Amino acid sequence: MKMIKKITSVFMTFLVMAALVIGSTSAVFAADKVDDTVKSTLVTTAEGLTDAIVQLKDEEIENYMSSGNDFTISAMQSWQTSKDELGAKKDSNGETTVVFKDDQYTVTVPLKFEKAEANFVYVFDSQGTPTSMSVDVQYGMGKTLQRAGLNTLMGIGTVFVMLILLSLLISLFRFIPNPEAKKAAEARKKSSSTSGSNTAASSGSSTSSKNNTSGSSSSAATSKDNGSSSSSSSGSSGSSVSYNPTGQSVVNYACQFVGNPYVWGGTSLTNGADCSGFIMSIYAKFGVSLPHSSGAMAGCGRGVSYSEAMPGDIICYAGHVAIYMGGGQIVHASNAKDGIKISGNAAYRPIVAVRRVL
């Protein structure tokens, strides 16, 4: 605390002295020429302030920085920033200079320190009141080159880092979705899907048309053949189906009723039917109307040889009829003892005719 009071008194003494001298001689010198008395006073003031400042300890500097005086605060900040870089004071580094310009005095106090040289630069107004102080560290050639090299390395490092970041950024572009490419891909996919659907639709239409043509021809033939025997088919019934029947479909449907009873004159597939009633009811399921007579069935549809027989064809015997299953087998309402059954030998009795009604 005593040291702070001492330094404060030194500050005030120098400042008051400078102000009195400059104020009393301000009219003596020209605008840009410094009077020797004023110069001597400013030099003494600046050198005295410098000697006081370089002796300050850290806690004393902190106390001065809270003084509220602008000049004192700026002086303490400048010295605190530079003192570790300079080290302890060694000696003067030349003559203190005073320059008067723009209605203010600039006083430069050059000093040597352990680590570097520095200029303490003070600015006084025309009345001799100090307004600012700064410490200008003077670096030697080696230090200057060292700092320049360090700055160069830092610059190169910065550029290198920026190049790396730029490369990473460019490499990330490929992961950024491209809306235009996505739209193009979706358009191609949609076009391909539409083309496939159209192809499938065309193929289906062609197949359906072909089947319909075949079915129409078969139905026409059946209707023509059945027309001659319609008088004997009264009482027969059947329901049409929503698809074109095939011989195998007829066989599969007929086999569902294997084991059901034989009833002479019957047409029920579940409660009993005779041979012609069984076949009549089976084909009625597929929209084909047949007479309830084995003899009349021998004239329905078109005739084929037994060697040409296919599943669904009607095998006609003397007084009996059966549905050909293929492989030499038949399904039929055999007799009261066996009911509806499958026989393994279609030629178990003489074959009168083979009729194809589909």
Image (cartoon, grey):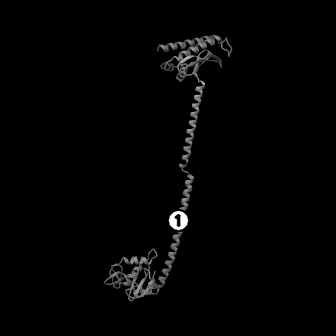
Q: Which is more toward the observer, 279 or 168?
A: 168
Q: Residue 344 appears at what percent x and percent y?
A: 37, 81
Residue 292 higher or lower than 51, as above or below? below
Q: Which is more toward the observer, 213 or 141?
A: 141
Residue 139 image-quadrant placement: top right
Q: Residue 175 appears at what percent x and percent y?
A: 53, 49
Residue 134 visible from this viewpoint:
no
Report the amino acid beneath label 1.
Ser
Q: Residue 145 appears at what percent x and percent y?
A: 60, 28
Residue 180 higher or lower than 158, as above or below? below
Q: Which residue appears at 53% of the width and 70% of the height?
A: 203
Query: Which residue reaches farthest right?
Result: 30
Q: Residues within 10 Å of mark 1 (few under 14, many from 20)?
A: few
SS for callout 1: helix
Q: Which is more toward the observer, 87 or 228?
A: 87
Q: Which residue is mark 1?
A: 197
Specify whether 232 is left or right of 76: left
Q: Which residue appears at 65% of the width and 17% of the height?
A: 100
